[in-house]
Amino acid sequence: MTDVSWHTWADTYQARPRRTAAPGDTAAVAAAVLSAADEGLRVRMVGSGHSFTDVAVTDGLLLSPTSLAAVRSVDPEAGTATVEAGLPLCDFNDVLAEHGVALANMGDIAVQTMAGAVQTGTHGTGRDSGGLASQVVGLEMVLADGSVVECSPDRDPGLFHSARVGLGAFGVVTALTMAVRPAFLLYAREEPMPLDEVLERLPELRAGNEHFEFFWFPHTGNTNTKRNNTADGPARPLSGFRTWLDDDFLSNTVFERVNRVCRRHPRLVPAVNRISSRALSARRYTDTSHKVFASVRDVRFVEMEYAIPAEHLVDVLREARRIVDRGDHRVSFPVEVRFAPADDVWLSTAYGRDTAYVAVHVYKGTPHEAYFADMEAVFTSVGGRPHWGKMHTRDRSYLEKVYPRLGEALAVRDRVDPGRRFGNDYLERVLG
Ligand SMILES: Cc1cc2nc3c(=O)[nH]c(=O)nc-3n(C[C@H](O)[C@H](O)[C@H](O)COP(=O)(O)OP(=O)(O)OC[C@H]3O[C@@H](n4cnc5c(N)ncnc54)[C@H](O)[C@@H]3O)c2cc1C
């Protein structure tokens, strides 16, 4: 046992690996996997630890991604870019911008590693473009026997379809080839709107915007809506002061203090939410796509998110509101609602269905179990699929009912990792 301890961003799980290594290229990853096999150790490459679940935890050899972080190529004409597993998404965005290209869509932070983000199905919101894994067109991987393979829709498609959202279960991803498009600006329109109006106008808001999402403030009927659409320009970014005020001061510094007070005095939460939901006023700006998609999140929280069939969203939110109104829980964090088109990634939360995502959060250190359990019951009643990197209590017996291709993915796993070299406790629960 090393003295190295590793923990997730939210400190929800810790790991005490037997050994760590930071391989600098694909051959070094293969050698590390083989040496772990000799010692009978399980192996896992971690990302930046931003999953809330124990999906990244290992008791064997922990591979750090920090030395495997080069951009291998960017080909604007082909619309592809190949990046090593450990490069943070924000750094990849910058390199793509230098070449005049960009990813079509992403989530709301960009500090995750490329492989870590893709492996759990990280997504943003989109009408036409889906999560990061749906933008992967090829993977380079090291399998359990130390072999280096490339897979794509044409080369070992079974492995490709299984391993894009692969939870690290199929092998160590060493490089990803991503689809990219010409760089673009987004016009962001953010404004408060009553929840009832959002739900009534949902079809129009979704159809009329490339990226629509909203945040509902529990204990109130208020939301903050965000509409991001491709724009010709010119870029009109927020002023430095407005960015600091909204994104740093109100969304991070003040929000942190407010949450600390609410954790100590939960009865204040409804009144505080009424004030918070009015504090962020409407704003409009135009900026480089990745600067609009992603922002900094300093306030630590614990999150559960489910992907539900989009047609159930209104009923699910009404039920969620009834649960909050019943008064058993005091919830200081907004509920985030996003969307994705159906994709073809076997273990993606949006596989084969038009999807709405509903995410619930609590401030770090606040008990989440009872609130999450009540919400999870609502999400699973409509066949919801939990985000693989966010808190949930589902196991294989449930997941095989909501993932029609799970059986095929498990057969691929039996082929490429029969001895479960890449296993961990989380995978035993969700994949068996
Ligand atoms: C503040 C915050 C905001 C977030 N926002 C969003 C969001 O907007 N949308 C969303 O969908 N999710 C979001 N998440 C969740 C987050 O994007 C995912 O949990 C993501 O997987 C974290 O990436 P990571 O690099 O930290 O990977 P880790 O959490 O470290 O690892 C995730 C998984 O990937 C595996 N892995 C990592 N590298 C490799 C590799 N090279 N080969 C094989 N397997 C590998 C790990 O073993 C593990 O199984 C957020 C999380 C936080 C804390």
Image: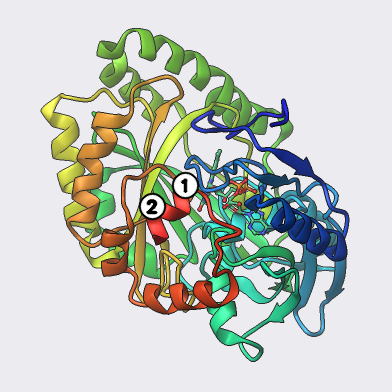
Q: Would residue 157 be found to the left or right of residue 177 on screen?
A: left
Specify few, some or many for label 1: CA neighbours under 10 Å numbering under 14, 14-19, or 20 or more.
some
Q: Would residue 265 be found to the left or right of residue 92 on screen?
A: left
Q: Quadrant of residue 369?
A: top left
The residue under label 2 is which amino acid type? Arg
Q: Quadrant of residue 3?
A: top right
Q: Residue at x 33, y 76 (%)?
A: 404
Label 2, on which residue?
429
| Above or below for 329 versus 375 | above
Q: Quadrant of residue 62?
A: top right
Picture coordinates of residue 295 (x, y %)? 62, 41
| Above or below for 252 versus 417 | above
Picture coordinates of residue 413 (x, y %)? 52, 72
Specify few, some or many for label 2: CA neighbours under 10 Å numbering under 14, 14-19, or 20 or more.
few
Whether residue 35 is visible, yes or no, is yes
Mark 2 falls on what kind of element? helix
Mark 1 falls on what kind of element? helix
How far is the residue under mark 2 from the one under mark 1?
6 Å
The residue under label 1 is which amino acid type? Asp
Discs 2, 1 touching: Cβ within 8 Å: yes
Picture coordinates of residue 233 (x, y %)? 70, 62
Q: Residue at x 38, y 14 (%)?
A: 263
| Above or below for 216 versus 257 | below
Whether residue 85 is visible, yes or no, is no
Q: Residue at x 48, y 64 (%)?
A: 126
Label 1, on which residue?
425
